[in-house]
Image (cartoon, rainbow, N blue to C red):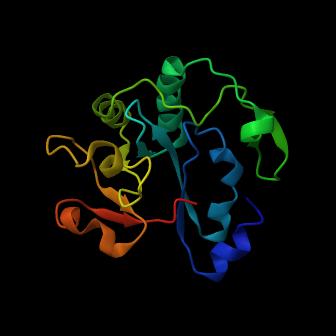
Amino acid sequence: PLLMLPLLLKYSISIIAITDHNSVLNYPAFQDFPNHGIQVIPGMELTTREELHLLALFPDYSSALDFQSEVDSRRLPMPNEPELFGHQYIINSREEILGEESVMLSQAIPISLEDAVDAIHQVNGLAIPAHIDRPRFSIISQLGFIPPSLAIDGIEVTRVQAADPYWNRYPVILSSDA
């Protein structure tokens, strides 16, 4: 986290969201950023059973942890294989390793898109389909469309022109997904 700070300040970035795959546990590592004028939003990039990525952004870490409990209760006990997929460290603001998640975080969680949106809203979070303009793990690549009845709070794109059919229907955030 501290290595990121000069770059964020150089480009006058004043707000970021921490959205690891299926986990909110690294959010506290960024607790010093507000001291530098950068607001940090706790979040998660949830992989639903449809194998699409859904951003969940929360008003506070307590709400994020409530949603983490919901995800953990549904997660399959599939162990991570660090030699194949890398380590899944939990770190603090000094980049010290506090622990390691043993269950594979990149797996799809057996929760439907609709149920995930509802669960996010139950803890006052925002539900935003991620990188809808990408050919993998997006709501468009997986379903082919955004269901009109889905109560999402916006869409995330990685390129401005890619969201054209949905641009006027939803609030849009532009992100690198990095």
Q: Residue at x 56, y 42 (%)?
A: 21
Residue 100 location in percent, x, y? 77, 33
Assign the N terminus to one quadrant of the image. Answer: bottom right
- Left/right placement of residue 154 relative to residue 28 reads left
- At 66% across and 82% down in the image, what residue appears? 10
Which of the image's four quarters has the C terminus? bottom right
Q: Quadrant of residue 162?
A: bottom left
State the image coordinates of residue 78 (x, y, percent, origin top left): 63, 21
Residue at x-position 71% and y-position 39%: 85
For the residue pair 37 and 109, the one nearer the viewer reads as 109
Q: Which residue extends farthest right?
A: 96
Q: Is residue 108 above or below residue 3?
A: above
Residue 167 sits in quarter: bottom left
Q: Nearer the viewer, residue 138 or 125?
A: 138
Question: Can residue 88 be seen from the camera position used here?
Answer: no
Exactly how many numbered labels are in the figure? 0
Residue 115 can be seen in this image: yes
Instruction: Indicate the position of residue 23 as horizontal and vertical percent values.
Output: 58, 37
Residue shown at the point (31%, 75%) measured from the top left: 161
Q: Is residue 169 left or right of residue 103?
A: left
Residue 158, image x, y percentages: 43, 66
Q: Toward which corner of the image does residue 157 lie, by quadrant?
A: bottom left
